[in-house]
C-alpha cells in the first residue's frame, strides 16, 4: 500500500474483508482550548486509543511508544492480523494518524496507509459516517517485530551533539523552536536541540491534506541542505510523524523519530550537557 490513500480510494475499497480502518482521533494540544474529539466515525472503523492503549502510560512523557508486547496485545484485541491491510485516519485531517503509521512501522508492519485529509475530507465528499460504537471483535494474530531503525533515543541525541552524524528536524512552530513562543505544556521552556533545523508540520500540509509530492520535494530541498540521516522531533513525537511521513512521500527514504522529543530534552539535557 502507498503511504497515503485518498478518501475516494477508501470509499471504493472499504468492503475489502482484509482491510482494517483505524480511527486514531485525539484531542489536539494547543496553547488555548483543546479541540474535542468527535464521536462521528467512518463506518466499520475501530477506535485506536493512542493515548491509553497504545502509549506507555507509566512514562512521565506524553505519547511514549509502548512495549512490543503491549502493542501486540492491543492490536490483537482490535482484530488486527499479520495479513491485515490498515488505513488509519483522525478527525483533524492529518494530525495523530501519522503517529499510528510510524508505530506500525516500528513494530514491523508495513502494510499501512494514512487517509489523506482524514474524517474532514471524508465528510467533505459526503461519504457515509456513523456514531462510534463498541463492537465484538474476533481476536487477531498480529505479531510485533520491533524495528529499532525507526526510533531514536535520548542518549543517541546526546551522542549526536559530538558526532553530528544525524540531522534533527523539529516539526514544532517556528516560535516554539526559536524560543519566542510559550510551550503548551506547563513549565516547559521553549527552544530547540543544538544544530537542529525547523520544518513546522503545517508547512507540509495544505488545509487538511498533504501537499503534492512535487511541492514536498521542493520544500525539503530548500530546508535540508546536508546529506545526513534525518531524525524527526517535535514536542512529544506526534507532529514529528507528520513531517517524517511527508519526507517519506517526497523522497522515498526512511528516517527516525526521537520519541521523547523536546519534552524529554528540555527536562533531561542539563543532566548530560
Image (spheres, helix red, strand yellow):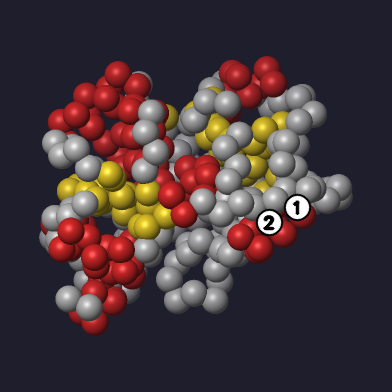
Left or right side of 267 for 78: right
Name which residue lies at 49% across and 30% down.
Answer: 3
Q: Is residue 107 above or below residue 161?
A: above
Task: Work out whether residue 173 can be spotted.
Answer: no
Locate residue 50, reporting x and y percent.
Answer: 57, 56
Q: Is residue 256 above or below residue 212?
A: below
Camera-side residue of 155 and 111: 155
Residue placed under numbered mark 2 in the picture = 72
Residue placed under numbered mark 1 in the picture = 76
- Element assignment for label 2: helix
Q: How many marks?
A: 2
Name which residue lies at 47% across and 54% down.
Answer: 148
Name which residue lies at 48% across and 64% down.
Answer: 64
Locate residue 45, reporting x and y percent.
Answer: 70, 39
Camera-side residue of 117 and 56: 56
In the picture, which quadrant includes the N terminus? top right
Locate residue 248, reporting x and y percent.
Answer: 38, 33
Name which residue lies at 71% across and 41% down.
Answer: 82
Write down the quadrant of residue 211 in the picture.
top left
Write down the quadrant of residue 95 in the picture.
top left
Inter-mark Cα distance, 2 to 1: 6 Å
- Element assignment for label 1: helix
Camera-side residue of 266 and 106: 106
Assess whether mark 1 and mark 2 are in contact (beta carbons under 8 angstroms). yes
Amino acid at each position: 500500500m502507498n503511504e497515503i490513500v485518498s478518501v475516494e480510494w477508501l470509499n471504493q475499497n472499504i468492503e475489502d474483508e482484509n482491510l482494517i480502518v483505524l480511527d486514531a482521533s485525539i484531542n489536539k494540544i494547543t496553547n488555548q482550548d483543546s479541540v474535542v474529539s468527535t464521536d462521528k466515525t467512518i463506518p466499520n472503523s475501530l477506535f485506536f486509543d493512542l493515548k491509553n492503549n497504545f502509549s506507555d502510560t507509566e512514562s512521565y512523557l506524553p505519547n511514549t511508544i509502548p512495549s512490543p508486547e503491549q502493542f501486540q496485545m492491543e492490536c490483537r484485541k482490535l482484530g488486527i492480523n499479520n495479513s491485515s491491510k490498515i488505513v488509519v485516519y483522525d478527525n483533524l485531517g492529518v494530525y495523530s494518524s501519522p503517529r499510528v503509521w510510524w508505530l506500525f512501522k516500528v513494530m514491523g508492519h508495513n502494510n499501512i496507509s494514512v487517509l489523506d485529509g482524514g474524517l474532514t475530507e471524508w465528510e467533505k465528499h459526503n461519504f457515509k459516517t456513523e456514531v462510534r460504537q463498541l463492537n465484538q471483535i474476533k481476536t487477531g494474530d498480529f505479531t510485533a517485530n520491533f524495528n529499532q531503525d525507526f526510533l531514536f533515543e535520548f542518549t543517541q541525541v546526546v551522542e549526536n551533539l559530538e558526532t553530528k552524524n544525524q540531522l534533527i528536524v523539529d516539526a514544532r512552530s517556528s516560535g516554539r523552536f526559536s524560543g519566542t513562543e510559550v510551550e503548551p505544556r506547563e513549565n516547559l521552556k521553549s527552544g530547540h536541540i543544538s544544530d537542529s533545523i525547523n520544518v513546522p508540520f503545517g508547512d507540509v500540509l495544505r488545509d487538511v491534506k498533504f501537499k503534492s509530492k512535487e511541492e514536498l520535494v521542493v520544500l525539503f530541498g530548500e530546508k535540508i541542505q546536508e546529506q545526513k540521516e534525518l531524525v524527526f522531533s517535535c514536542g512529544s513525537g506526534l507532529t514529528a510523524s507528520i513531517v517524517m511521513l511527508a519526507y517519506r512521500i517526497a523522497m522515498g527514504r526512511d528516517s527516525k523519530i526521537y520519541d521523547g522529543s523536546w519534552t524529554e530534552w528540555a527536562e533531561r539535557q542539563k543532566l548530560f550537557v
